[in-house]
Image (cartoon, helix red, strand yellow):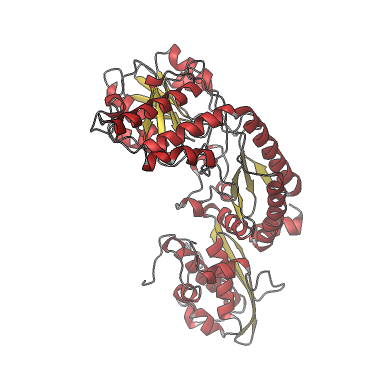
Amino acid sequence: MLYTEKVMDHFMNPRNVGEIENADGVGEVGNVKCGDIMRIYIKVDGDQIVDVKFKTFGCGSAIAASSVATELIMGKTIDEALALTNKQVIDELGGLPPVKVHCSVLAEQALKAAIYDYATKNALTFKGLEGYDPDEDHHDHDVVDIEF
Amino acid sequence: MKQIYLDYSATTPVKREVIDTMLPFFTEVYGNASSIHSFGQEAKTVLEQSRKSIAETINATPDTFYFTGGGSESDNWALKGVMRANRKKGNHLITSKIEHHGILHTCTALEKEGFEVTYLDVDAEGMISLEALEAAITDQTVLISIMFINNEIGTMQPVKAIGEIAHKHGVLFHTDAVQAYGNVKIDVNAMNIDLMSVSGHKIYGPKGIGGLYIKKGIRIQNIIEGGAQERNRRAGTENIPGIVGFAKAAVMADEALESHREKLIYLRDKLANGIMATIPYAKYNGHPTERHPGNVNICFEFIEGEALLLSLNAKGIAGSSGSACTSGSLDPSHVLLAIGLPHEIAHGSLRLSIGDFTTEEDVDYTIESLKEIVQKLRLMSPLYDKVLKEGK
C-alpha cells in the first residue's frame, strides 16, 4: 500500500470534518486546477482554539493531513497552533510518500490562513504570523522543506 | 471481503486453459527454437503454429506477424522502425493527442531525432476528425498512427476510414490495437491496416508478450538487434511459453468474441446507467456507442480520483483514475484534458473496466458502494458547499 495505516485511518475516518457556523477564522488554500483545496474553520475563546473543523477536496493524503492537523491543534493556544509545522503533520501520520509532502504543507498553510483571518478580523497580532503573506502561493508541489 | 476486479483494461488474469497450455513449455519442451536438435525443433514447430493461429484471427498470413515483448515494444518498433527506414520519403508522422504513452513518448523521442509530428485533436467524445487528418497530410508524411480503442475513455476510432485516407495519399497506417484486440473483430486487410500492435496480457494471456503485424513489403528498421530470430527482424530467444499462451488466449478470445462482447456490453451499460441514474453531478466520458465493450469512464464533480480509488479499494473494488495524484504528475490524464474537460473535473475521473469474470452482482455492489463513497467524499469537499447551499 502506498500509505501508512495511520494515513488510511485518518482518510477513512477523518476527524473534525465539517464547518463551524460563525467561525472566528476561516482559511482556504490550494486550487482546483491542481486537485486539492483545504478549508479550515476555527472557533477561538480567549487565546484558545476551542473548536476546529475542515473541508478538503483532494487525494487521500490531503484529507488525512487535514484531519491530523485539526486534531493536533484542537484545544491549543493560537501561539501553539502557529508553531505547528508540516513535519509534525507528517510524523503524526507515520510518514507520507515524497510526492505527497505538499499535502502536509497545505494543512499547515490552511491553518495559518484561518488564524490570519481571525487576527485580521480582531485586529490582533501574533508572533507566529510575522512575515505571513496570505496571497503567497501556498501550493508549491515542489516544497520539500523537511529533512528525511 | 469480496474482491471485485474492475480494471481489465490495465491487465487481465490469465485463463486456466491458457496456463495449462503454457506449462509444458517451461519444463518439457524447453528447447531454444533456434537450436538444430529435437528440443529446439519442437519449440520451433509450436512457435510457428502459434504465429499462424494469431495471424488467422486478424486475417493475416503468418509471415506478417512478429512476436515482441509487449504492446509498448510494438509501438516503439512500428514508429521508430518505419520513420527511420523511410527518411528518404519524408520526416512527418501524424498521430493523436489521446494515444497511449507507448506512442506519445516514442513520438517525443522521434522529434529529438529530427522528425516532425502532428498531434491531432479529438472532439468531446474522443473522436479524431477525418477531415483534420486528411488536411494534416503533407508530401513529407510517412506514417499515420491512430489507436484503435482508447485505453482510458474507450472511444473506438473509425480505423477503416483512417486507413483509406492514408492509402489514398500513399501514407502508411499503424494502429495500436492493444485494447481492441480480443474485444472487436479485426481484419487487417479489410480495415486497411499496415501495422498493428497487440498484447497478450490484455486478452487473458501472459504478460511480457505482444506482437506487431507488419504488412508485407513495408520498409521497417529493427530496433532490437542481435540474433536472427523473427526472420532477422526482432532479436532475442523466443519466449515460447509466453508465445504459446498468447496464441491460446488469442484463439479463445476469437472463438468467443460475440458472446464476450454481448456479455460485456450488457454489464457495461448496466454499470454506467446505474451510476448515472443514482449519482448526480457525474459525466459519462467517451463515445456513447463507438466504444470498448467493457469500458466505463465517469467523472464525479467536487471530488478527487485517488480518494475515490482508495475508498473503493477499502470496499474490495479495484478501479483506476486519470487524476493527477494517480498519474504521478501534477496534471490529470492527457486524454481527459484532450476531450476538453477542465482540470477540476478531470481530477475526479474513474475508469471501471469489465471483463469475462465480472458478474451482475459485482456491478450491483459497485453501484451501491460508489453511491455511498461519492456522497461521503462530497460532504467533505469545500467545492460541494455551493451545491448544498444554493442547489447550484
Query: Residue B14 placed where, x, y %?
Result: 51, 42
Q: How many marks?
A: 0
Q: Quadrant of the N terminus of chain B?
A: bottom right
Q: As drawn, is A143 to the left or to the right of B265?
A: left
Q: As drawn, is A72 to the left or to the right of B360?
A: left
Q: Nearer the viewer, residue A126 or B132?
A: B132
Which residue is found at the position 29% from the left and 27% from the top? Answer: B233
Quadrant hosting residue B312: bottom right
Q: As drawn, is B174 to the left or to the right of B113?
A: right
Q: Is residue A29 visible?
A: no
Query: Residue A51 placed where, x, y %?
Result: 65, 79
Q: Nearer the viewer, residue B119 or B361?
A: B361
Query: Residue A73 placed where, x, y %?
Result: 57, 80
Which residue is found at the position 46% from the left and 77% from the top? Answer: A130
Quadrant hosting residue B254: top right
In this view, B293 is above or below B63: below
In this view, B312 is above or below A47: above
In this view, B327 is above or below B141: below
Q: Is residue B80 visible?
A: yes
**Residue most extreme to the left:** B226
Q: Nearer the viewer, residue B119 or B209?
A: B209
Q: Nearer the viewer, residue B131 or B252?
A: B252
